[in-house]
Image: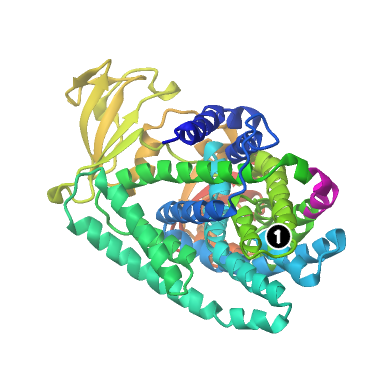
Amino acid sequence: MDFTLILIAALMLVISIVLSPLSSRLGMPVLLIFLIVGMMMGEDGAGGIRFDNFELAFLVGNLALAVILLDGGMRTRADTFRVGLKPALMLATVGVFITAAGAALIAHWVFDLHWMTAFLLGAIISSTDAAAVFSLLQGRGLHLNERVSATLEIESGSNDPMAIFLTMMLVTMVETREASAGWQVASILVQQFGIGTLMGVAGGYLVVALVNRIPLTPSLYPLLVVASGLAIFAATNALQGSGFLAIYLTGVMIGNRHVRMLPMILQVHDGLAWLAQLCLFLILGLLVNPSELLPLTAGALLLASTLIFVIRPLAVIGTLWPFGFNRRELGFISWVGLRGAVPIVLALFPVMANLPEARLLFHIAFFIVLVSLLIQGTTMAPLARKLKLEVPAGDDPYRRMPLDVSAAGDHELMLFPLRGEPWRDSRPLQQLKLPPNTAIAGVFRERLCLQPVPELMVSTGDVIAIFAVPDLLPELGKSLSGRQPPRHLAERAFFGDFVLNGDALLGDVEQVYGIEFDELPPELSLADCFARRTRGHPVVGDKVLLGPVTLVARATDVDRVTMVGLKMTDQET
């Protein structure tokens, strides 16, 4: 047995992982590092590896995307669909068509491609990358307002099937050179969506039932979930449905139902998703030789620039304007049309079909992904902060451990380290303001476990173990957080000095604070002001300017603001 291949593959993984901290230091996406490592190990690089097995790359690409979508689905909260489903679906369908058509026009002019081939290239590069977007946002510690994050999350998870449909349809059209062939493939669109949706929802129920009813060793639950997800993905494709849509919906079903050992499942799947991205970007990097990209630089750079600065903004504004997004939100979503692994994998479809210009399309798509990661990826976090789209967030626990005992219900053991300025001075445990239905299990200090008696003094460096349900995580994070947020995200700076009930009437606010709201009736509630401004879907962080004050949504319940912060206009920064 030749172990050279195993050695090379393992070394590539090690090098990529070791270099990943450069992402935060240099401000570049970690996925770009993986691509560069793959290219450097390729035929034109220091590794000198000749790799042109497109069939293997196609198989690895599909499996990796399936694992990534399953993980992304499990982390998609169902309540985000309330805010982001409709705009995201418009962006993932109509927006994809607009993007593909706009890119086709430029590609036809720049590369002198046949119209069908140009539209095929447009379809290939029309999809955004969920994994790339959220690995960047989370890696920079950004907590965006729910309207923006939900729209981006659902869009990037649901536009892959539409891009795949378009790509498959146009591959068939280019093969036959008949436009009518496209209608034959388009007629299967409803079937693909229908079977994909049915299999995803049914498969999600089945996986949840399996996990909850079969007692297993804890470490086997994550493996059961990923194996079941891949089985649903393969079975859906065999039935001529959309496997990518099915496995994404399976993940959504799993992540939003009571599932035994879910925190452990999510923790393991986070590693599996990173491994999938690593393998995918490394193998895609090996497929490309930089010498083959150089002749395309001028044309591909023009196409990439037009896609970033013109086509994506037009697609966003053309689809999202009816949904109450403000200009800052539209501007950020327009910029976050990040291309990742999906366009490169889609570019393998024409290669597998042996189309005449398949290699050209593959190299153009690869170049556009590089430009997108380099330009959009490096500027995404600074732009979000500049546009003030962040909202305050509490700290997550250092570790969450499911109890897996029926009597405990949903309770978990959570470890919260005490750190930062608020914990520099010792205070007794009895002064901690913890929500109901929680209990302190113990306090760890210098490798000792201390009994959580009310008089015990705690300070920086201690770790508190708490029994709590996951719904209380935000409240616990705020109570025990010791990190000092940026000045603009501090509670008083962000929400203001006064906290009001959302049902408070403008007339009452006028009398108590001596403020006049001449333009609005006094019987209007503060919550109604937000409903008008956001067209019925307010989120935490929304602002309404009313004369000399700014109202800031501090808490929401479904589609109504329940708590409102009041800031004087001169507090705005």
Whether residue 156 is in magenta: the answer is: no
- Camera sees residue 149: no
Which is more toward the observer, 352 or 415? 352
Residue at x-position 56% and y-position 59%: 151
Toward the front, the furthest residue is: 1
The C terminus sits in image quarter: top right
* Residue found 67% across the figure and 72% down from its top: 170
Classify 487 as above or below 386: above
* Residue 300 is covered by the magenta coloring: yes
Label 1 belongs to which residue?
A: 358
- Callout 1, which amino acid? Ala
Judge from the rendering whether residue 146 lies leftward or rightward of residue 462; answer left or right: right
Residue situated in front as seen by the camera: 569 or 37: 37
* Category of crowding for the residue at label 1, using alpha-carbon neighbours closer than 10 angstroms: few (below 14), some (14–19), many (at least 20): many
* Image quadrant where one finds the N terminus: top left
Q: Furthest residue to the left? A: 407
Is 429 located above or below residue 63 in the figure?
Answer: above
- Residues rendered magenta in the picture: 294-303
Per the picture, the main secondary structure of the magenta-coloured stretch is: helix
Secondary structure type for disc 1: helix
Q: Can residue 287 be seen in this view?
A: yes
- Where is residue 58 shown, x and y percent of the image? 55, 55
Q: Nearer the viewer, residue 549 or 456?
A: 456
Give the x, y percent position of residue 45.
68, 33
Q: Is residue 315 above or below residue 275?
A: below
Q: Where is residue 95 in the image (x, y as percent from the top left)?
A: 66, 66
